[in-house]
Amino acid sequence: MAQVLVRQLDSKVVLRLKKRAKAHGRSLQSEVKTILEEAVPDYEAAWKRIQGFRKRMTKSARTFSDSADLIREERDR
């Protein structure tokens, strides 16, 4: 795994990170790692999951109504 070094980080930021880590029950390193992972999600994996879901839905014999039509009907009542 790669390592990242952040230089000249304000000490106030580090203190806030430590407080946040403590609140989540994690170490500072684990908290920073979690923040970074959430900041750059794996879009490729997400799209693969979406495509798989779409394939399963199109293979299904089940039909789905157009939600726009349902909304229009409800509005017209």
Image (tube, rainbow, N blue to C red):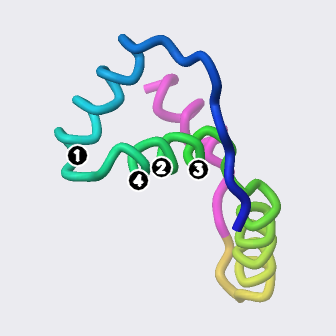
The reply, left or right, for residue 30 in relation to residue 59 is left
In this view, the mark in front (4 or 2): 4
Between residues 42 and 76, which one lies in front from this camera angle?
Answer: 42
Residue depicted at 79% across the width and 62% down the height? 47
Q: Secondary structure at mark 3?
A: helix
Quarter of the picture containing the C terminus is: top left
Residue bearing the label numbered 3:
37
Q: Are marks 1 and 2 in contact (CB under 8 Å)?
A: yes
Residue 44 position, x and y percent, is 82, 61
The disc labelled 3 sits on which kind of residue? Glu
Give the magenta-colored segment's residue range: 64-77
Residue 56 position, x and y percent, is 73, 84
- Crowding around mark 4 (Cα neighbors within 10 Å: few <14, some 14 to 19, many 20+) is few
Question: Of callouts 4 and 3, which one flags the residue occurring earlier in the amino acid sequence?
Answer: 4
Residue bearing the label numbered 4:
30
The disc labelled 1 sits on which kind of residue? His
- Residue 52 among magenta residues: no
* Mark 4–mark 3 distance (CA, rounded to whole Å): 10 Å
Residue depicted at 36% across the width and 11% down the height? 12
Residue depicted at 68% across the width and 54% down the height? 3
Between residues 42 and 54, which one lies in front from this camera angle?
Answer: 42
* Mark 3–mark 1 distance (CA, rounded to whole Å): 16 Å
Residue 67 position, x and y percent, is 61, 45
Dot label at residue 24: 1
Residue bearing the label numbered 2:
34
Quarter of the picture containing the N terminus is: bottom right
Residue depicted at 51% across the width and 24% down the height? 76
Q: Are marks 2 and 3 in contact (CB under 8 Å)?
A: yes
- Judged by its main secondary structure, the magenta piece is helix
In this view, the mark in front (4 or 3): 4
Q: Are marks 4 and 2 in contact (CB under 8 Å)?
A: yes
* Res 14 → quadrant: top left
